[in-house]
Image (cartoon, rainbow, N blue to C red):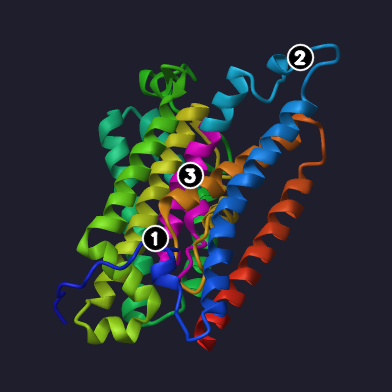
């Protein structure tokens, strides 16, 4: 069925979208307050974590300005790592808003990086190697979307299958070894550009910012973006309203695949080479960042800014825990606890809204 205009929904996560008013108003008021607390709470957790790691990394006899955590070099390292996770988390947000999931993004990141590096070391022009690598990532995203929307295979199964296929493919393609971008392992100009900074802001972080702004504009101000929220809210109602549900699902999985490819190229340029292990478990970090940022696994809820805050938290925890020499598995424990808590609150929210 052809697409038809659909009124713009209220901002995701807003009281207008999520709150249902009843005669007493208590439940609606409480749900709205919980939403606000979650948004402000994530920012508060980030601030507390940053303060804790800053104080913990002050050298003995030094002052706060000498803290390793807030040093210029360390903040740039955080920004560069955020850039890679952030790009795939943005793609994951599109999928989650439709009540889907994409577990293949980490493996696709690794596969795209290996493909790009092999083409580069073989002497292909960088522009051509880049286009081929991103086209490959886009095609994988479209295949995921086709299997979910047209064939009806659950997104968990489809993307879990491609997680294994792409990871195995990366090992086979690279023979399980590192692949440098150039035959002599020198740093090509494009990798130097990726490692540079503009006014103290890493180039890769600027790429993340551009992708984030474009994604936010697409979700909030385009008809297809509004369809994505409608699809996540109620697929059958969206179909009856004239929305092309298949095209919407193809769009979100294509975006997720393409952005995983972009992240794969970014990481390859940052490391000046590719490894088939690159991106291992990144899909979990991307999903965690989106959900911590307010995206609902039930669909129809999520923002790019919220996902950005989730990415900040994930990377601040990873960096700070490493700096103070705590077992890195502590980060996974903290992320897991926060994730369970936020999903539980989201379920509670949904039940409260449904009951009023």
> Quick check: marks 2 and 3 in contact, CB under 8 Å?
no
Residue 148 location (% of width, % of height): 38, 75
- What residue is drawn where x is 51% and y is 86%? 356
Q: Secondary structure at mark 1?
A: helix
Q: Position of residue 45 (x, y in %)?
A: 66, 46
Sequence order check, earlier mark of 1 and 3: 3
Position of residue 123 relative to residue 3, above or below, is: above
* Sequence-first disc among 2 and 1: 2
Q: Which residue is mark 3?
A: 86
Q: Is residue 300 visible?
A: no
Residue 14: x and y in percent read 43, 63
**Residue 25 part of the magenta-drawn span:** no
Residue at the spot 56% in from the left edge and 42% down from the top edge: 312
Residue 63 image label: 2
Range of magenta residues? 80-108
Q: Quadrant of residue 211?
A: top left
Q: Quadrant of residue 48?
A: top right
Residue 281 in the image, given as x and y percentages of width and height: 61, 52
Callout 1 touching callout 3 (CB < 8 Å): no
In this view, the mark in front (2 or 1): 2
Image position of 159 with respect to 135: above or below: below
Left or right of 183, for residue 175: right
- Local SS, label 3: helix
Label at residue 94: 1
Alpha carbon distance from label 2 to label 1: 43 Å
């Amino acid at each position: 069925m052809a697409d038809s205009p659909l009124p713009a929904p209220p901002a995701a996560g807003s009281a207008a979208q999520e709150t249902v008013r009843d005669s007493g108003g208590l439940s609606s008021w409480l749900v709205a307050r919980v939403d606000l607390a979650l948004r402000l709470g994530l920012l508060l957790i980030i601030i507390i974590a940053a303060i804790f790691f800053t104080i913990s990394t002050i050298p003995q006899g030094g002052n706060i300005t000498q803290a390793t955590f807030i040093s210029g070099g360390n903040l740039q390292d955080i920004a560069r790592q955020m850039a890679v996770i952030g790009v795939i988390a943005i793609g994951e947000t599109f999928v989650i808003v439709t009540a889907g999931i994409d577990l293949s993004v980490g493996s696709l990141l690794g596969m795209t990086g290996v493909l790009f590096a092999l083409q580069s070391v073989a002497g292909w022009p960088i522009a051509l190697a880049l286009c081929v690598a991103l086209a490959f990532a886009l095609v994988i995203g479209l295949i995921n979307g086709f299997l979910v929307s047209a064939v009806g295979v659950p997104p968990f199964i489809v993307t879990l299958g491609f997680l294994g296929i792409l990871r195995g493919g990366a090992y086979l393609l690279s023979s399980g070894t590192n692949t440098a971008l150039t035959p002599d392992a020198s740093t090509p100009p494009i990798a130097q550009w990726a490692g540079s900074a503009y006014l103290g802001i890493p180039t890769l972080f600027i790429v993340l910012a551009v992708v984030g702004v474009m994604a936010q504009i697409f979700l909030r101000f385009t008809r297809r973006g509004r369809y994505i929220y409608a699809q996540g809210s109620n697929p059958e109602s969206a179909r009856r309203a004239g929305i092309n549900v298949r095209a919407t699902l193809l769009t979100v999985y294509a975006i997720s695949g393409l952005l995983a490819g972009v992240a794969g190229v970014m990481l390859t340029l940052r490391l000046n080479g590719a490894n088939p292990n690159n991106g291992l478990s990144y899909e979990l970090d991307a999903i965690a960042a989106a959900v911590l940022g307010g995206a609902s696994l039930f669909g129809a809820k999520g923002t790019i800014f919220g996902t950005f805050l989730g990415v900040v938290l994930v990377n601040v925890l990873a960096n700070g825990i490493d700096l103070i020499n705590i077992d890195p598995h502590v980060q996974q424990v903290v992320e897991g606890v926060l994730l369970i808590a936020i999903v539980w609150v989201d379920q509670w929210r949904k039940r409260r809204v449904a009951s009023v």
